[in-house]
């Protein structure tokens, strides 16, 4: 559990804050660029061409690790809800869009990624609804112990 807290702290607070400071100090936010293009320009302005290459590697590793993390989350959800025999369908829906993404504009890729994040909410909401009575019972029992 401690690893998760450290990971969230490092990514959310330290890395994002440093990136925002580099974007503000470099003035990249005034260029009209958005997303990773703006960040790459900001790091190039502040750290030179080396900064741009380092950020390119970091963004690639972040995208790859996010892709793998979401695959594991989707795989777990599909297996739990529908069984392992439906995993072949997941592979088609998960890997085929990557081939098409190489030909798409970045804005469309981000829109698809945003939808993918939204889709994983559906099985989680179903699970929350199904487990809400059990949660309420456990919560009430623990509240009685506290009082």
Image: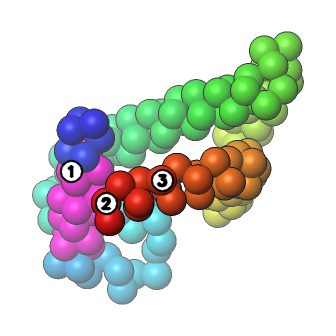
101, 15: nearer the viewer: 15
- Which residue is found at the position 41% from the left and 61% from the top? 143
Residue 26: image location, x then y, percent: 21, 75
Total tally of numbered discs in the picture: 3
Is residue 113 left or right of 30 when viewed as pictured?
A: right
**Marks 3 and 1 close (CB-CB < 8 Å):** no
Q: CA gap, disc 1 to disc 2?
A: 34 Å
Above or below for 27 versus 92: below
Q: Is residue 65 visible?
A: yes
Q: Which residue is mark 2?
A: 146
Q: Is residue 104 visible?
A: no
The residue under the point 26% across, 71% down is 20
Q: Residue at x 17, y 78 (%)?
A: 25
- For residue 72, the mark is none
Residue extending farthest to the bottom is: 30
Left or right: where 12 falls relative to 72: left
Residue visible at 29% across and 50% down in the picture: 8
Q: Are marks 3 and 2 in contact (CB under 8 Å)?
A: no
SS at badge 3: helix
Residue 142, percent from left and from top: 41, 54
Comparing marks 1 and 2, which lies closer to the viewer? 2
Residue 10 numbered tag:
1
Label 1 crowd bin: few (<14), some (14–19), many (20+), radius 10 Å: few
Please state the extent of the stretch shown in magenta in the rendering: 7-23
Image position of 61 (left or right of 138): left
Give the number of the disc on residue 141.
3
Magenta segment's dominant SS is helix
Quarter of the picture containing the C terminus is bottom left
- In the image, is residue 131 above or below residue 36? above
Image quadrant in which the N terminus is located: top left
């Amino acid at each position: 559990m401690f690893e998760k807290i450290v990971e969230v702290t490092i990514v959310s607070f330290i890395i994002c804050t440093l990136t925002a400071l580099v974007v503000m100090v470099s003035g990249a936010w005034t260029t009209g660029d958005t997303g990773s293009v703006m960040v790459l320009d900001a790091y190039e302005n502040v750290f030179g061409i080396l900064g741009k290459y380092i950020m390119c590697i970091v963004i690639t590793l972040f995208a790859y690790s996010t892709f793998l993390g979401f695959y594991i989350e989707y795989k777990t959800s599909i297996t739990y809800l529908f069984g392992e025999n439906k995993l072949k369908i997941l592979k088609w829906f998960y890997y085929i869009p990557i081939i098409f993404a190489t030909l798409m504009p970045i804005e469309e890729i981000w829109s698809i990624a945003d939808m993918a994040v939204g889709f994983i909410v559906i099985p989680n909401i179903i699970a929350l609804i199904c487990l809400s009575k059990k949660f309420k019972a456990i919560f009430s029992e623990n509240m009685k112990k506290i009082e």
